[in-house]
Image (cartoon, rainbow, N blue to C red):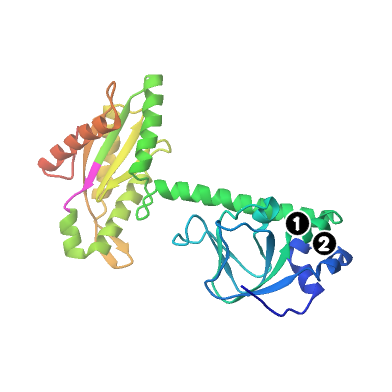
Amino acid sequence: MRSAPWQQDLQQIRRLRLFQNVAASSLQQLLQEFCACRLDSSEILLSPFNRNQHLYLLLEGELKVYLGSLDNQPVSTLRPGECAGEISFIDNDRPSAYVVATQPSLVLRLHRESLLKLSDQSPELMQNLLELLCDRVRKGNRIILDSEQNANVDILTGCFNRRWLEHVFERESTRCAFNGQPLSMLMLDVDHFKAYNDQHGHLAGDYALCLVAHTLRNQLRPKDSMVRYGGEEFVILLPELDAAEARTIGERLRQSLEQVGSFYSPVGILPGVTISIGLGQMQSRDGLESLIARADAALYKAKEQGRNQLFG
């Protein structure tokens, strides 16, 4: 980062969100305190390893924010008019993220002491700063929520993944046992999926898996959980349903896919697929592994007897 020429422009400063509605006389005092700095592309402006006592106002270019490591995907993008470093600027501590210029950029740097002096005179400035901090907190909460959801969801099919299955089984098995309710599991496998991939291509196979997920998930209750267990295998957890009820559900799901002779996809019209299903019902002292083993054994029987059927 190097010093850069900047022609003092009160109107430009007033358009920045931080200084909106702040009296011109107060801002006039700050003009002498600003230092313009030029950043090269890929230059790091803020780092968790260095304390920060400045607030940066982006005038030109673009900054990206990275959490944890620069190898991660950026969590947000800052554009002209936005601020960087306001949290560490306030608490005089190390930044919680990396801020990196993604193109040649121009920032105005302001030392914390200069702004703190102005804040005593301008409640509008403090209001703007609080709003900026609230935005950062809300964005942080969304990042946490998105990260948690992504960690539990299979990207291809949109179904939950095995990590989520462990969590939801613990919750639902405890609840069903406490209330004296049954809990059933369907384990299903797409029939002859390797041959389908070999004949139509792996991209077609991906679309077939999406077809399975979409067709079946739309027929389940909100309390049911459909999980992509791995490859072409799926698990459906059915709380409060006994074996007979789960069998009815499973047979309906199987038939719904059997009736899809072909479907449209981005690679053209593709043939449908069928599924084999194994049914397992939770028994006393069952854990997730033992219930899966029981449903998997039933699935093996369904395949052994010719596929495109339910066993259990």
Q: Amino acid at mark 2?
A: Asn
Give the residue at x 74% y 58%.
112
**Relative to the observer, which residue lies in front, 57 or 256?**
57
Q: Chief secondary structure of the magenta span?
A: strand
What mark, if any, has residue 128 been given in the picture? 1
Q: Name the side, left or right, on which 144 lies relative to 82.
A: left
Disc nearer the start of the sequence (2/1): 2
Q: Residue 10 location in percent, x, y?
A: 81, 73
Cβ–Cβ under 8 Å for marks 2 and 1: yes
Q: Is residue 224 left or right of residue 142?
A: left
Secondary structure found at label 2: loop
Farthest residue to the right: give it. Answer: 25
Residue hosting label 2: 21
Amino acid at circle 1? Asn
The residue sitting at 51% across, 56% down in the picture is: 67
In the depicted structure, whether residue 49 falls above or below residue 302: below
Quadrant in the picture for residue 8: bottom right
- Quarter of the rendering containing residue 6: bottom right
The correct choice, above or below, for 165 with respect to 16 in the image is above
Answer above or below: position of 45 versus 256: below
Q: Nearer the viewer, residue 15 or 37?
A: 37
Residue 312 spot, x, y in % from top left: 19, 32
**Viewer-proximal residue, 19 or 152?**
19
Mark 1 is surrounded, within 10 Å at the Cα level, by few (under 14), some (14 to 19) or many (20 or more) other residues, namely some
* Magenta residue span: 188-192
Q: Residue at x 89, y 66 (%)?
A: 25
Q: The N terminus lies in which quarter of the figure?
A: bottom right
Q: Residue 302: x and y, percent?
A: 15, 39
Where does residue 224 sit, x and y in percent of width and height? 38, 37
Q: Crowding at label 2, few (<14), some or many (≥20) Cα neighbours within 10 Å? A: some
Q: Left or right: 146 with respect to 266?
A: right
